[in-house]
Image: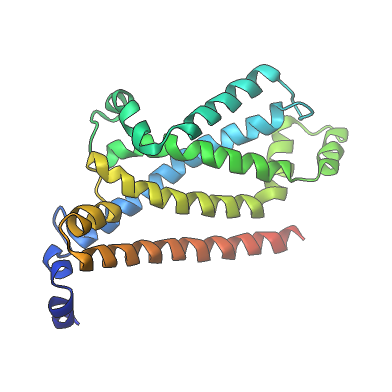
């Protein structure tokens, strides 16, 4: 196998597994950025999504001021192209992580880049919950937190898993652009060590690895979404 790679994929073999540009390093960087950005962006997305649903007109706790604030913030961040967002918030990134370049620095723009997309997805998922169940919970004296966790999130958990899967897949795509600030990852390997150096074998292998990663996320997400859907029944 190693001899075959050396013969037909010489540039892939030359990068090796370790080191700053190795395949193992690139895979780790992509997974690191995806995981932590999904956690931070996911928390922000859920918070904003829940607030948008609760404070909208006709919601459980209607509040025009907070709805408009959250709605405008989500819309503004969603409208900024990711590559511009990285440059725009560079001073903020410097304050938070102490540097503007590297894998950890990429977490800030990745989080702010993915959370508005996820917030809208969460908003749509929660709004699909049967209003009759919400009204029934209110009539029984349920608190706001009870309605959030026992009605909204419980009833929409299957859909929330589906939108989370879509968001993570989108996030993997954003990590490719994070290479612009020295974050590394498979996307950076495909461009910097493949496309820019005319090493098509590197580009192909990096692309295949990204596709495999996305496929795994999709399969796992679909499995849990279907399982939660059956449990709801």
Q: Quadrant of residue 213?
A: bottom left
Relative vertical location of residue 38 with respect to residue 206 in this rendering, above or below = above
Q: Quadrant of residue 47?
A: top right
**Residue drawn at 28 percent across, 39 percent down:** 104
**Residue drawn at 30 percent across, 30 percent down:** 87
Screen quadrant of the N terminus: bottom left
Q: Residue 227: image x %, image y %? A: 64, 64
**Residue drawn at 46 percent across, 54 percent down:** 169
Q: Residue 110: image x %, image y %? A: 39, 39
Relative vertical location of residue 202 with respect to residue 123 in this rendering, above or below = below
Number of numbered discs visible in the structure rendering:
0
User: Would residue 65 be found to the left or right of residue 217 on screen?
Assistant: right
User: Would residue 82 be found to the left or right of residue 149 on screen?
Assistant: left
User: Would residue 224 be found to the left or right of residue 152 on screen?
Assistant: left
**Residue drawn at 76 percent across, 26 percent down:** 57
Residue furthest top in the image? 65
Q: How is the image coloured?
A: rainbow
Screen quadrant of the C terminus: bottom right
Q: Residue 135: image x %, image y %? A: 85, 37
Q: Quadrant of residue 84?
A: top left
Relative vertical location of residue 108 with respect to residue 12 in this rendering, above or below = above
Q: Residue 37: image x %, image y %? A: 41, 43
Relative vertical location of residue 135 with respect to residue 162 in this rendering, above or below = above
């Amino acid at each position: 196998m190693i001899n075959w790679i050396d013969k037909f994929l010489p540039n892939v073999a030359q990068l090796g597994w370790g080191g700053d540009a190795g395949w193992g390093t690139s895979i780790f960087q992509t997974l690191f950025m995806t995981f932590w950005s999904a956690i931070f962006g996911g928390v922000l997305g859920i918070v904003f999504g829940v607030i948008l649903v609760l404070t909208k007109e006709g919601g459980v706790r209607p509040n025009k001021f907070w709805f408009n604030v959250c709605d405008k913030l989500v819309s503004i961040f969603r409208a900024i192209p990711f590559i511009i967002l990285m440059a725009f918030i560079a001073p903020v990134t410097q304050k938070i992580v102490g540097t503007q370049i590297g894998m950890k620095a990429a977490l800030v723009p990745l989080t702010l880049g993915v959370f508005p997309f996820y917030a809208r997805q969460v908003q749509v998922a929660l709004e699909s919950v049967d209003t009759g169940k919400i009204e029934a919970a209110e009539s029984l004296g349920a608190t706001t937190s009870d309605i959030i966790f026992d009605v909204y999130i419980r009833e929409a958990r299957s859909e929330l898993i589906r939108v989370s899967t879509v968001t993570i897949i989108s996030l993997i795509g954003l990590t490719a652009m994070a290479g612009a600030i020295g974050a590394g990852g498979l996307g950076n390997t495909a461009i910097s060590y493949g496309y820019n150096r005319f090493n098509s074998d590197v580009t192909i292998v990096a692309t295949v690895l990204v596709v495999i990663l996305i496929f795994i996320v999709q399969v796992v997400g679909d499995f849990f979404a279907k399982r939660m859907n059956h449990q709801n029944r």
